[in-house]
Each structure stands twice: as C-alpha cells, then as structure tokens.
Image (cartoon, grey):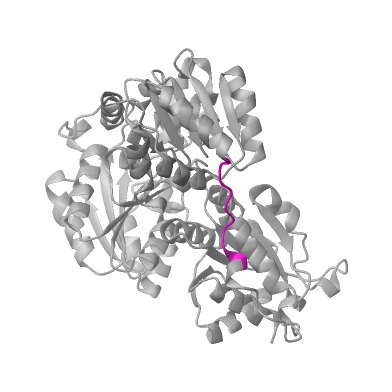
Amino acid sequence: MRGADLLVQTLALAGVTKIFSLSGNQIMPVYDACIDAGIEIIHTRHEGAAVFMADAWAQLTGEIGIALVTAAPGAANAMGPLFSARQSESPVLLLTGDSPRGQDGKGAFQEFDQVPMTAPLTKMSMRAESAATLGDTVALAIRTALSGRPGPVHVALPFDVVEANTGGVRLPTAASMLREHHALDEKDLAQVLEALTDAKAPLVLCGPAMNATRQGTVLTALRDALDAPVLAMESPRGLKDPSLGDFAHALKQADLVISLGKPVNFTLGFGAAAACAAGCRWIVIDNETAERERAELNLGDRLALVIDANPLDAAGQLMDAGAGGRARKDWRGQVAALIAARSYDVSASGADGKITSAQLVAAVQRQMEAANEAVLICDGGEFGQWAQAGGHAAERIINGPSGAIGGGLCYALAARAARPNATVFALMGDGTVGFHFAEFETAARENLPFVVVIGNDTCWNAEHQIQLREYGKDRLIGCQLSGARYDQAVMALGGHGEYVTDLADLDAALARAVASGKVACVNVIIDGQPAPSGSAH
C-alpha cells in the first residue's frame, strides 16, 4: 500500500466523501488512490476556490472539509481563503503537494518550505515524514481541526512519501479523529451560574462555530435554559452587523456579558467602556490562550472570570444546569426587538427608479420561503450587508469575520454538494462575483445548480462609500466597474442567465433561474446604496 492509499483510506475512515481540489504533478497519486476509496473529487478552477469550498462544506456538515492542491504556487494560491477559514472557525484540512524529501536542498521542481507560510494561518501545519506515519499524521490533523475552537490545519505531502510503500501499517482508529472535549470544572460552572442568577440583564455571546447553521437549536435551547439572550456573532462589522439591527444598544444596557468563544476584539469595540454599560462584568470561556489573554488586555478589571474550556462543552453544561433565577422575559424581548430593528423601508424607490438592494433581497427572500429547503449565501461589501440584513434561511453562510470577499460562488457550489435537495441562493455584488467567476463552469460541469444573484451597481461600493465619506465626491478614484453582462458570460459557461433592470420583472426572473435546473446568474441593476445601519451606529 502506498502512502497515498493510506492517506485516502484514513480520510474515508473519517467520513470524507468529497475532496475539493485542483490537480498538479505532486498530488496525482492521491487522485489515483481516491478511485479505490470511492471518494469524489470536485475539480475546481483555482486553488483558493477549493479551500473556500472545503470551508463551506465544513460549516454545513460539521465534518472536516478537505482541500487538495499542488505544491508551491498552488499552495500559495490557497492562503487567502485559509485566513477566512481560520476566522470563520471552520475545520478544514489543506493537503498540499510537495517536492520529494529525498531531493531536499537540491533544487527540486517547485521545492519550497510551505510550513512557515501556512503556520500563522492554521491551528497546526506540518510536513509528512514518512509513508508509514502518514495515516497518524492525518488523524492528528483532523482531530486538531475539530477540537477546541475549530479551524484549518495543513499537511504538506512530499511526492516520495505518497509514492512509498507503507510496509503494511494499520489504519488509525476512527476514535483518534474525533474532537477532544474540555468541559468546565465544577467550581467554574458554579461561579458562572451564580453570576447568571444575580444578573438582571445578561448577554451570552458566541463565535461563528456556535451559530444556528452549525449547531442547530443549541443557541435556542441555551437561551431558554438560562432565560437570557444568546446570539452568535460572525460578521466583520461586529456591532454594526446589519443583521443584528440595534443590538449595540443592548450591549450598552447589559450588566453581565458571557463570551462563549466570542473573541473580545474589534467586533465588540474591544470591549471598551464606550461600548458597554457602566459596571458591566465579563466572563470569558475560551480554549485558546491567545484569546483569553486578549480578553484580559482589553477588559482589564471588568473581566470577572476567565476560564479555559471548550465553549460548546460549556454550553451543554449550562443547558443541563439552567440558571433562570430571575424572570427576564422583558429583557429577552427587549433585546430581540433591538436585533430585529431595521432602518430602511423596502417599498422606498431607488434613484432614477432603479431597484434597491432592499427590494432585491426581499424578492430573493420570497423565493427562499417558497422552497422546501433553502441555503442562503451572503458575500460582499455593501450589497452583502443588505443580504445579511434582509435575508434569512435555516442555513446561512456569510464571508465571516475575516472581511474577505469573493468566496460566495465557491460557498454556493459546496452548499449544493452538501445539500443536494436545497435551493441555494448566493447574493453578492458585481465586485465579488469576479474573484472566482470560472467556478460557474465547475458548477455546470459537476451538475451542481444554484442561483447567484448579483446586486450590480457597477462599482466597488464599500470602498466607494469610504471615499465619499472621507474624501468627498470630487475625490473618487479606482472603484468603478463596467456594466458587464455577467449573465451572458454564465450562459457561455453552460449556465442560465437573467438580466433585470425593472422591479416588475424581478420575481419572474428569479423563478426562471430556480426552475432552469442549471447554475444560474441573475444580474440585477441596482441603486448602489450604503449598507443599512441601526440607530446605535
């Protein structure tokens, strides 16, 4: 058995059924091994796209997402999405080809030390040492990705390692690839429960890994058990996340904030006094030393308790114990109303009669509500924020705390692969769609239909709005885009295209896109407006 066979059989034992990949010389033995293991390869048009797809797969399935790319330039192309996966807390295993260990230092084809490149972006990065240990290396990587705060890991695969004979070594056990648990001890649990019992207006904040898409009803159950507002925050705009409405007002009224894995960073105004109520106390529960130290730095003496524990495990303990010592129905209702607040009118007309972002998102929402099962993808700057504010589905993926845009097409493709019976809508701006446009061909080739809706304002509107705000309308530069017919380009790649300029035509165009059974692009000319913001902003 080759190292490649041991690698792929280990992945199969971990439940892997799909690998997102762009081929290259050093990884062809792995491709060959996938045939016998029955693992499907979804072959992408860019290495970065493969990582974005693995990220979305991990978010929707809870499984490890696998991206397989070639050495050196291929690995380098994967770096940006790896940063996004780390910030979104997605368990992704990046496998990269590598030059042979036996040729180290000799100037082999694409010889490059990849580990120092990926290490700052991952929870663990290593180069495989031998064919015989490759299974254990991959098992450790998977366990690391899934445990604690989930995140990406990297294993470089030297060509001579994947080609070498393993010597009949056994596969690692499935148990060796399961996530590690790290619960609160009894003393810490008692202190958290006591603080909750005493609080009149507590908030429980969670990170991306604990959102409803990934954990189902956990947050709702925790909310009821603690009789306290509980929410996950996953947007780079933090307290200004349009999907959270006026939530910033709630933080200014809370007397206790419990962070269950939510980093106390820029998304919370660094936890500064200006963002919080006077006298508000904080409890931080986090596996990562760096995040606990960051909380201590930013909160100072307002940090009442910091605990090394797994937030998901802690949530389960808190649900079992309950802490509803006070009746907080009014407080919960108040916070829910603040989150639901929106500062815009969907019926308001756009400039020159153009379709507004709010109207476009509302039309997509009608389609999602008519579907038996829907997945919503939100990506981009200003229009991406409109999508988050006005769109909702049982499962949602956004571009996450990294603030990077451009993965939406890839997220949607992986979402359709993970949810074959769902109608998948990916909402993005005309800037965003250009990053990985070639993946429309991948979707058509792989027969993975979904609907991309482009809010087309012919500019990079997020940066355009910065220029308007900071420098004035006479100092605009470099942010304009053309009126390119993205819909026609998608048709040329094997998909379905719609072009919409009139609100009266929008619902029918969206319905045709869904009914086409193809990957579809609905290119909608809109009035490019700033993202909505609540009154607390």
Q: Is residue 425 left or right of residue 261?
A: left
- Is-magenta flag for residue 364? no
Q: Is residue 69 left or right of residue 436?
A: right
Q: 351 above or below 319? A: above
Quarter of the view holding residue 330: top left
Residue 527 at x, y percent in the picture? 27, 36
Question: Could you tell me which residue is drawn at 38 percent across and 59 percent down?
Answer: 412
Residue 97 appears in the figure: no
Quarter of the view holding residue 57: bottom left
Q: 532 above or below 409? A: above
Question: Could you tell me which residue is drawn at 54 percent across and 51 percent down?
Answer: 85
Q: Which residues are magenta?
A: 176-185
Question: Could you tell me which residue is drawn at 55 percent across and 30 percent down?
Answer: 265
Q: 209 above or below 298? A: below
Seen from this angle, which residue lies furthest left?
A: 504
Q: Nearer the viewer, residue 30 or 407?
A: 30
Quarter of the view holding residue 28: bottom right
Residue 147 at x, y percent in the picture? 58, 54
Q: Nearer the viewer, residue 300 or 241?
A: 300
Seen from this angle, which residue lies furthest top?
A: 278
Q: Nearer the viewer, residue 181 or 470?
A: 181
Residue 60 appears in the figure: yes
